[in-house]
């Protein structure tokens, strides 16, 4: 099985040829007399990673191989071995431990191979963890703190990682973060930089750690801001083509707290925020991220428990409710008035008394309005009129003036009095109502005229049904 980084060209040829994975080492071969190779699991550049078993201690180990038979020979592999020695002195639980390192000449090969034996991690690399989606702020800052503590421990011992990317950050089943390839990976890709820790090296580790936080929050790798490989994660979009500034996490994924978004931006590009302190170490970056996450949690907690000052709409709600109640009461009273106005009234009630001129209408106390009455002036003919519109609900009195009476036809006068049956019915209708002293009873009628036509009409009463009135004794027929 061929692994990327190794080539079949030059096998068994000149001394400068690079050995191949298929010919020098196979699954089952024994390395350094104790490490039994099981299977290749990956590789990058000129290195290849094997899973093996330490037959002395009976434990799984990771074996990283680097050919040392190329140009420069053993001198080319020396930075690789020196970095393994420095990493082996680290003992932090967040860092993968290095057990052994050395040179080996495979059987049938023409050159040596440098190897580094390290702890086998039962966990998932960061791209596999983010395959199900990015993490929330709390989980992301928790992993960031673990990675920052591991890098700070390495820096305290004078060792920088130099090549932090998603491929060498693992998360175990218990949620613990482990960082691999401390100094070893950088020694392969940049041998000149694989020296003692410096401020620039610490700053580079902090920038790469901010890129890891970016990936935890968005599921994308900010390739425009760091030279490290994405290792399977999609690249984050940049603000402009050929720009070194990727979009902020909030622009890539909704829901990222604003304060945490600012921390990521400060870690990736300090020059973008000259007014803020530079996050020069992993510990400073982790502290700022945790403070931002706590601020976000406190804000959400405060909004959940304390809604804050009432808004203008909420202040208007009591007044709106009060107005609705008043409107409902007014509408109910109006409807009740309409309903009461349609109820039957007492029989024999007199609605009003008609007087002369434009004097106001007088209602009799103790009586409810029921019937409308009419009066007939002396000398007028008995006449009828059309019913007014139903909407005219004013209580009018029908009046007939001499000017409205029909003139008598030529010839001898004729009897214009109504039939006796009509008179008797009207008398019976008015007999239930006793007239006040000095006045004659008025005649109820179902017919009515608009009051506006007779507001200034002088009304007089004549004898009806045998009632005598001195004013019409002369000129009336028996």
Image (spheres, helix red, strand yellow):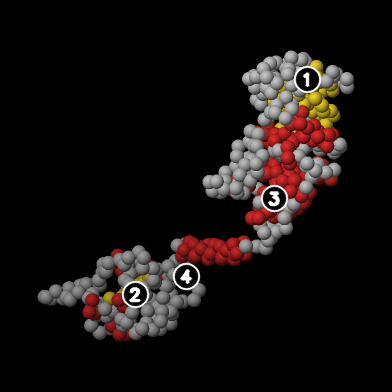
Inspect this view and state whether residue 45 appears.
yes
- Circle 2 sits on which residue? 451
- Circle 1 sits on which residue? 105
- Circle 3 sits on which residue? 267
Who's the residue at 74% across and 48% down the image?
200
Left or right, 145 with respect to 439, comes to: right
Left or right, 136 with respect to 350, comes to: right
331, 197: nearer the viewer: 197
Name above or below for residue 334 compared with residue 122: below
Front: mark 3 or 4: 3
Local crowd size for mark 4, using a 10 Å CA cut-off: few (<14), some (14–19), many (≥20): some
Front: mark 3 or 1: 1
Who's the residue at 78% across and 26% down the image?
115
Q: Contact, CB < 8 Å: mark 1 with mark 4?
A: no
- Circle 4 sits on which residue? 368
How far, Cα to Cα, is label 2 from label 4?
19 Å
70, 345: nearer the viewer: 70
Q: Which mark is residue 349?
A: none
Name above or below for residue 455 compared with residue 133: below
x and y, in percent, of residue 130 in the image: 67, 36
How far, Cα to Cα, is label 1 from label 2?
129 Å
Front: mark 2 or 4: 2
Q: Mark 2 or mark 3: which comes first in sequence?
A: 3
Dot 3 falls on a residue whose secondary structure is: helix
Dot 4 falls on a residue whose secondary structure is: loop
Q: Toward which corner of the image does residue 161 lie, by quadrant? A: top right
């Amino acid at each position: 099985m061929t692994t990327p980084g190794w080539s079949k060209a030059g096998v068994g040829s000149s001394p400068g040829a690079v050995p191949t994975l298929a010919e020098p080492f196979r699954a089952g071969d024994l390395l350094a007399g104790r490490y039994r190779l099981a299977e290749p699991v990956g590789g990058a550049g000129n290195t290849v990673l094997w899973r093996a078993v330490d037959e002395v201690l009976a434990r799984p180990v990771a074996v990283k191989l680097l050919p040392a038979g190329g140009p420069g020979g053993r001198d080319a592999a020396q930075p690789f071995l020196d970095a393994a020695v420095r990493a082996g002195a680290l003992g932090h639980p967040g860092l993968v431990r290095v057990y052994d390192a050395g040179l080996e000449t495979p059987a049938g090969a023409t050159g040596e191979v440098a190897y580094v034996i390290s702890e086998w991690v039962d966990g998932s690399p960061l791209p596999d963890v983010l395959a199900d989606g990015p993490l929330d702020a709390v989980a992301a800052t928790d992993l960031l703190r673990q990675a920052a503590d591991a890098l700070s421990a390495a820096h305290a011992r004078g060792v920088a990682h130099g090549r932090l990317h998603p491929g060498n950050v693992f998360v175990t089943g218990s949620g613990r973060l482990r960082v691999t390839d401390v100094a070893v990976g950088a020694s392969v890709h940049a041998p000149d930089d694989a020296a003692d820790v410096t401020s620039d090296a610490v700053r580079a580790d902090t920038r790469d750690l901010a890129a890891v936080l970016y990936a935890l929050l968005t599921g994308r790798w900010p390739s425009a801001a760091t030279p490290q490989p994405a290792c399977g994660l999609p690249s984050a979009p940049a603000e402009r083509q050929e720009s070194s500034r990727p979009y902020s996490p909030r622009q890539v994924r909704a829901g990222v707290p604003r304060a945490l978004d600012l921390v990521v931006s400060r870690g990736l590009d300090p020059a973008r925020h000259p007014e803020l302190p530079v996050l020069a170490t992993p510990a400073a970056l982790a502290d700022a991220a945790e403070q931002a996450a706590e601020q976000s949690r406190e804000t959400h907690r405060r909004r959940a428990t304390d809604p804050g000052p009432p808004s203008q709409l909420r202040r208007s709600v009591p007044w709106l409710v009060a107005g609705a109640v008043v409107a409902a009461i007014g509408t109910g009273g109006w409807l009740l008035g309409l309903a009461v106005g349609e109820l039957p009234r007492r029989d024999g009630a007199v609605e009003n008394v008609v007087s002369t001129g434009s004097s106001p209408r007088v209602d009799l106390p103790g009586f409810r309005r029921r019937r409308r009455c009419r009066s007939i002036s002396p000398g007028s003919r008995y006449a009828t009129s059309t019913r007014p519109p139903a909407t005219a609900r004013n209580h009018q009195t029908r009046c007939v003036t001499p000017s409205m009476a029909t003139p008598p036809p030529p010839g001898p006068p004729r009897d214009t009095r109504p039939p006796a049956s009509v008179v008797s019915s009207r008398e019976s209708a008015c007999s239930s109502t006793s007239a006040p002293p000095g006045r004659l009873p008025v005649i109820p009628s179902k017919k009515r005229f608009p009051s506006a036509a007779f507001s200034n009409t002088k009304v007089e009463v004549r004898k009806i049904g045998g009632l005598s009135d001195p004013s019409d004794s002369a000129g009336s027929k028996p």
